[in-house]
Each structure stands twice: as structure tokens, then as C-alpha cells.
Image: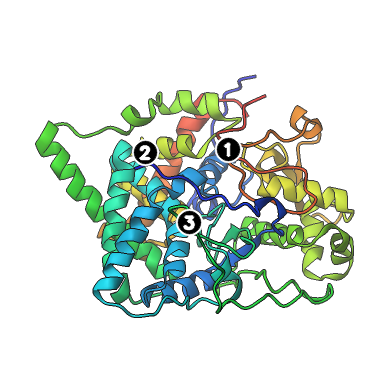
Amino acid sequence: MVTHRVPRQIDETTAERLLDGEPVAGHEPLARLIAAASAPGRDEELIGEAEALAAFRLARHAAPASTGASRLKGRLARSVVIKAAVLVVAAGGVGGVAFAASGGHLPDPDGRRQPRHAVAEPDTPPPPDSDPPPRERVPPTAGTDPGKVERIRVLCNRYFAKDIDHRRSALEHEPDFRDLINYAGGRDQGTVDRFCDGVRAPASHPNWPMNGAPSPRPDGSLTWRPNPAPTRRQTQPHPTPAKPFTKHHGSSSAEGSAGDSPAR
Amino acid sequence: MRETPVRDSTRDTEEAPAIISSDDLDEALLAARMGDETGFRLVFQAAQPGLLRYLRVLVGADAEDVASETWLQVARDIASFDGDWRGFRGWTATIARHRAIDHARRERRRTDVATPVERFLDVPAADDTAHDALDALSTDQAVAMIATLPKEQAEAVMLRVVIGLDANESGRILNRRPGTVRTAAHRGLRRLAADLGQAGSW
């Protein structure tokens, strides 16, 4: 179905919002393009690491500054490989990088394993639901308000970082998640799961906020709703990506690069 | 250079992924500046995808080579780099741009022809791309579309959207006033919107 639309005029405010990554109504194709350009990094985009590290070692040996000990503590020291390097885009604030704990090994780019470093401290066990787990940090705002999309992304990341048993009670009790419930349009776990799934998925995912429309609530405020008609992607398992981005408890969908998902 | 992504045998039993914030990368960067390899690897992994995409717009198929030259200089000079993660993004983008300019000069001397991006990606005209790809616009396609913009607009958009710099920071890299950079980015968006609009279909 091809319809020709004259694009709405893009004034400076709209342009700035789009550049911040907001899914501005009426400019969905452009917002999608921007989202695709700033999508999480893929594994093949980490090419060149071994060479860069070799150059770094050479430079260090020219001016040795440390012993072999890692100065980084805790989870940063343990987890070296960023499985899905999210582009840290400053939408008036900060972004984040998702990575998976490597389980005690420090993988070496040329394949050898090194023992876990003695300096690394074990994570403290997460306190009961009242606070976010210590391994995860919500990126701080930087003075100006982050874009709405950025906030949604942050909330969804926090939500998925909880294991399934804790998500329902988190939705009920954590004040920040009230916003998430508003965005998702429902306070039940299934609704929020689906919404956040779409938020974290590539722009081609049918549930992504871009693939929906602003939807007025009874009080007149707006929320985003995914396209109401179920698509094939909603009833089939998400296609297995060639290079999974992140894995998280319970979610049935694995993210893949937007280019890998065939149009269906 | 062939790069094999590292796979850890404990992958399948990993816990839920955590989030590295900018604070973490500040910390990693500080460690890298003091010679810590783990820190260096973290900032590399966080910065490289953005640099590659930016370089794709500047030098097309030679992005990986120029990125490699970029990191040689970064590795050499990082010990004397003074700044946080945000500053590092701008710094590495600046180095990348300089290496790209050097590379382009060498190429012109060698071949007398600038390397068009389209040759790398075999990408059709912007409006055809948009029409085919509205359902599954990949990162590469999006970057290729941005690369069809006039150079100043393309760079302004990439530095903002992909590297995450504001108009002041981008202005320093491009040697332009912030207002000029902002205008260029907005013009780029309007042009992209027009191309996408011509493709129709939403």
C-alpha cells in the first residue's frame, strides 16, 4: 500500500526532538531512520579491537604505569566483552551500554582466557525489591530533561533487569514504574512486557513505539500504543538473530540487528 | 583484518544484562588512561560502532581502515587525554575525521577520484532505499541514506545522532559555529524527510 504523503513541515523544535531520538508524531519514517542509525552496535562493529589493544599495550610498555592489576572494580573488571555496545547518545543526558556478565572469565581478544582478577569484588546480593539491583544503574540525568524515548528505554531496561518473580511487585510498588505503566497503557505484566519488548527491539519491530500512534487517555494526556492489529511477528517467535544483542530473563524475544529481520 | 568476536562458554548461564552508564565509562576511561587494559577495551567497545558509522559517511568502504588508524593514535595519546567519556567521544571523532581527511587526500592523489559511499553498499538512490526499507530499515541503510546528504549536513546529523555530541562540540570538530551546525543538521533532516516522503507508504 503506497500512499504519497506530503511530510509535515519540520520546524526547529521538531527537528531537535527528532535529533534527540523522539518518535515525533507525523514523522515516523524519519524517526525510524534516526533510530536505525543510532541503534545498538553489532558484534561486527567491534572489529579492530585486538589491533587497538595491541597498540595500547605497545604504548604502555613505552611508558609503564601500572602492574598487571586491573584498576577497575567489581562487575566492570569482570565483564569485558560488551555483547551489544549501545551507542551512548546524549539526548540531553546519558545513554547506557548493555553487557552480560562473563561469569568470572576475562576473555582475551586473541582467544586465551585469563583467570578472574583478584582485585574484582563480588557483587553484593541485590536487596529486596525496594531498590534497583546494584549491578545496574539508571543513568543520571544531566541537567536538562532527557527525551521521553530515552526515559522509556531506561525504565524498560530496569524492568527487564528484574527477574520475572519481581516484576509484578515492582510494577505495583516502585514509583518510577508508574510512568512505565502509563507509557505501556496497562499495569499488568503482559502489557508492560510487550511494550518494553518493542521499546528494546529494533525499529522494525511492530511493537516499537514508532509502530504505533499517540493514543489519548481519558484525562486527555497522550500515551503511545502499538498498532492494534496483531501482526505475524506478534504470533510467531521473534526471528533468531545472527548476533544476539542481549539476553534477559523470561523474555521470549531476542533482539537482532534491524537489518537481519526480514520484512514479513 | 579478521576479527573473531569472543565467545564465553558461560554465555548461556549468564545473568540478566546490566547497564553500563556513562559513569561506568568515565571510570573505565580513567583506568585506561592509567594503562588499564580492561578499561581500554570497554571504551573501545563503546566507541567503535559509532566511529565506524561516522567514518562510513566520510570515507565509505575504507571506514574500517581509517578506524584502525584512528585507534593507533588514540592508543598512543590516551595516557595524556584529559576528559570524561563524553569528551572522549568528541576526541576520538576528531581524530577519526583527521585520519579520514588524510586518507581522502592520499586516495585522490592515487586515483584522482573520490570514493563514493554507494560503491561500498551498492545502495540505490535514497528514495528507492526508503521505499524498500521502511519496514526493516537497517543501520547500514540508514547510514547510507544520511551519507547521500551534502557533506556538511551529513556530518552534522551523524555527530549528533550517532556520536551524541551537541552543537558546540560538533562545531569544534567541524570548525563551524554551533548555530551553523544546528542549521545544517536541521536541513539534513528536512532533506531526508523529503526523500522518505517521496517513497510514500506509512
Query: Which quarter of the rendered picture does the N terminus of chain A lie within?
Result: top right
Q: Could you say which disc has been placed on residue A258 in the image? A: 1
Q: Residues within 10 Å of mark 3 (few under 14, many from 20)?
A: few
Tell me how the rendering is colored. Answer: rainbow
Q: Residues within 10 Å of mark 2 (few under 14, many from 20)?
A: many
- Of residues A8 and A61, the one nearer the viewer is A61
Q: What residue type is labelled 3?
A: Arg
Instruction: Check if mark 2's residue and mark 3's residue have beta carbons within 8 Å.
Output: no
Q: How far apart are marks 3 and 1 (CA)?
A: 32 Å
For residue B107, which quarter of the picture?
A: top left
Q: How far apart are marks 2 and 1 (CA)?
A: 19 Å
Q: Name the residue under label 2.
A: B147
Q: Could you say which disc has been placed on residue A75 in the image? A: none
Name the residue at 62% across, 27% down. Answer: A262
Q: Which amino acid does label 1 sit on?
A: Ala
Q: Name the residue under label 3.
A: A112
Q: Classify residue A264 as left or right of residue B83.
A: right
- Of residues A72 and A103, the one nearer the viewer is A103
